[in-house]
């Protein structure tokens, strides 16, 4: 049994570049609670916060820690970027790649990759060069590849930003399935509707600061700050 990664603890964590604070200082304790949605206007620091949590942005102050050592935590996390990273290989090879990396036998990796391919509705496309897929299909492929090792934590940065309704629905279904398999999901979105459909917990960012961290029902029904209230009303935040 793999040791539980959560809680994730941020203490005075900040990222500064060229004298500018992109996010922080942030204090936050996050338990595994299904889907955590990060919201906030453009430039609020959502992407930076996700990257800090995943350990790919160097901290300028403070710390980000999991309940297990960093190397153990890292092996149990996956990150889906806003523009999906697709290998210039076939769809099947893209899916099998993370399994090869952890040393899984070729036959077993291929079996799992075939299943994952079917799960995202891409059966028949196994041998296609993945760079030929449509934007929505690439996003589903990136998500399936991130999930194929059953990570304890999955980060996603606006995975549905350029997708239409049906593709968004498919991605959301995959996320809900992963949640049922106990993957903790931390994801940014601009869509209030998507946040309402998916979130168990909401983090609201504004100007690099973490302004609100509440259960979804509290955030949407009785937001605690003027910034979140204005954002939910559709006002433009300065
Ligand atoms: N390397 C960098 N150097 C300087 N400023 C940066 C750098 N990277 C990001 N920023 C700035 O940091 C701020 C936070 O950026 P971030 O990408 O985290 O915001 P965001 O909430 O994800 O925005 P969006 O909704 O547009 O994706 C922005 O003002 C951005 O311009
Ligand atoms: Mg962003």
Image (cartoon, rainbow, N blue to C red):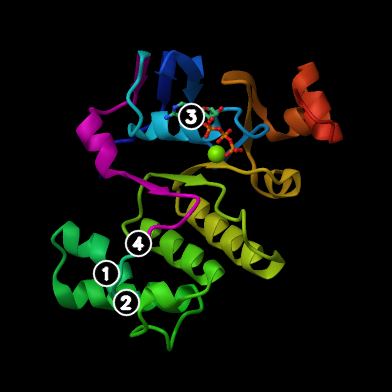
Is the shortest distance between ligand 1 and the CB of mark 3 under 8 Å? yes
- The verdict on residue 70 being magenta is yes
Is the shortest distance between ligand 2 and the CB of mark 2 under 8 Å? no
Q: Residues within 10 Å of mark 4 (few under 14, many from 20)?
A: some
Mark pair 4, 3: CA separation = 24 Å
Disc assigned to residue 49: 3
> How far across and down, in percent of the image, does residue 198 sit?
65, 48
Compared to residue 134, the image places residue 142 above or below, namely above
Mark pair 3, 2: CA separation = 32 Å
Mark pair 3, 1: CA separation = 29 Å
Which residue is the site of mark 1?
Answer: 96
Q: Quadrant of residue 213?
A: top right
> How far across and down, in percent of the image, does residue 233 sit?
86, 33
Disc assigned to residue 92: 2
Mark pair 1, 4: CA separation = 8 Å
Q: Earlier in the sequence, mark 4 or mark 3?
A: 3
At numbered mark 1, what does the secondary structure look like: helix, strand or loop? helix
Q: Residues within 10 Å of mark 2 (few under 14, many from 20)?
A: many
Residues under numbered marks 1 and 2 in contact, where contact means CB atoms less than 8 Å apart: yes
Q: Foreground: 131 or 136?
A: 131
Provide the residue span drawn in magenta. 62-86
Which residue is the site of mark 4?
Answer: 148
> How far across and down, in percent of the image, does residue 57 sit?
36, 29
């Amino acid at each position: 049994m793999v040791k539980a990664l959560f809680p994730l603890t941020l203490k005075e964590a900040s990222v500064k570049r060229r004298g500018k604070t992109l996010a922080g200082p942030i204090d936050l304790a996050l338990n595994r609670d299904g889907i955590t949605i990060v919201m906030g206007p453009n430039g609020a620091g959502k992407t930076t916060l996700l990257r800090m949590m995943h350990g790919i942005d160097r901290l300028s102050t403070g710390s980000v820690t999991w309940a297990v050592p960093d190397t153990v935590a890292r092996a149990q996390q996956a990150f889906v970027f806003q523009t999906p990273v697709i290998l210039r290989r076939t769809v099947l090879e893209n899916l099998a790649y993370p399994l090869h990396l952890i040393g899984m036998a070729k036959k077993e990796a291929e079996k799992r990759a075939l299943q994952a391919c079917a799960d995202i509705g891409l059966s028949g496309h196994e041998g296609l060069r993945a760079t030929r897929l449509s934007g929505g299909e690439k996003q589903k492929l990136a998500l399936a590849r991130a999930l194929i090792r059953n990570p304890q934590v999955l980060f996603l940065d606006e995975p549905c930003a350029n997708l239409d309704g049906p593709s968004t629905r498919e991605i959301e279904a995959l996320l809900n399935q992963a949640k049922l398999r106990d993957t903790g999901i931390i994801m940014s979105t601009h869509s209030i509707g998507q946040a309402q459909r998916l979130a168990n917990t909401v983090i609201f960012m504004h100007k690099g600061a973490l302004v609100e961290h509440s259960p979804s029902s509290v955030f949407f029904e009785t937001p605690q700050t003027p910034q979140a209230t204005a954002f939910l009303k559709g006002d433009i935040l300065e």
